[in-house]
Amino acid sequence: MEPSREGLHVLIAVIAGCEVGFWVVLAAGLATRYLLRMRGTGAALLLGVPLVDLVLLAATTIDLHDGGTAGFAHGFAAACLGYSVAFGHSTVRWADERFAHRFAGGPPPRGKPEHGAARARYEWREFGKAALATALACGFLLIMIAWVDDADRTEALHGWLSRLGVVLAVWSIWPITYTLWPAKPKAPSPPAEHGP
């Protein structure tokens, strides 16, 4: 069965809305916490960030349940879910540090290490999150494939399994590179010479 154009457009709109919604809910939570000084309400809004993922999961599931044929949008939704779950906490922490510093006198945000073993560890941690994101996204894809149980309707999802694997393989270049060839601190610039 071919997916209806209208159903596909609705799903794409939901995906876009959820991506925007993630940042809107995050910004609302941080603004409430730091600008309005309502820490409890801000924390409650931040806890709502994962609910955006549930909306996306529900929209994808409903579309397939209603007889839709999986396409690029369904695979992309699974990838978004995986990455959102794996990187969501660190993204919230990253934004919280910057908001607290800018609006509440918090300490300067922590940057990523510049060089040495600390940078390699950082890159491996990020790769670990990407591996978790890939595992989750592939898990969502396999669940959708098994649930629909129709090879013709889920053919596009199989391609996403290998696509996500390629993204993870490319991502591995950074931690491997920083492990084998650690970045060294920049040499200090020589003092400027003054004329007579």
Image (tube, rainbow, N blue to C red):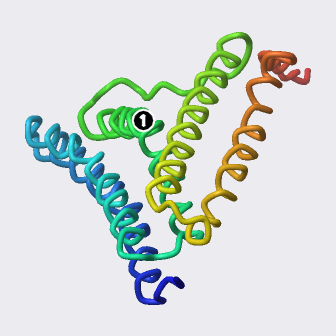
Residue at 48%, 25% in the rendered image: 110
134 relative to 97 in the view: left or right: right
Task: Estimate how packed mark 1 is, as few (under 14), some (14 to 19) or many (20 or more) residues with alpha carbons within 10 Å.
Answer: some
Residue at 50%, 40% in the rendered image: 136
How many numbered dots are placed on residues in this image?
Answer: 1
Query: Residue 5 location in percent, x, y?
Result: 48, 89
In the orientation shown, which residue stands out farthest toward the top? 117
Query: Residue 171 location in percent, x, y?
Result: 72, 37
Pick whichever, 192 or 166, lies toward us: 166
Q: Secondary structure at mark 1?
A: helix
Hey, which quadrant is residue 188 in on the image? top right
Disc 1: which residue: 94
Pick whichever, 26 or 18, lies toward us: 18
Pick whichever, 61 or 124, lies toward us: 61
113 above or below 135? above
20 relative to 28 in the view: left or right: right
Query: Residue 175 location in percent, x, y?
Result: 74, 25
Query: Residue 160 location in percent, x, y?
Result: 65, 56
Q: Amino acid at mark 1?
A: Trp
42 relative to 109 in the view: left or right: left
73 above or below 96? below
Q: Quadrant of the C terminus?
A: top right
Residue at 65%, 57% in the rendered image: 158
Residue at 33%, 36% in the rendered image: 96
In the orientation shown, which residue stands out farthest toward the right? 196
76 relative to 186 in the view: left or right: left
186 above or below 65? above
20 above or below 132? below
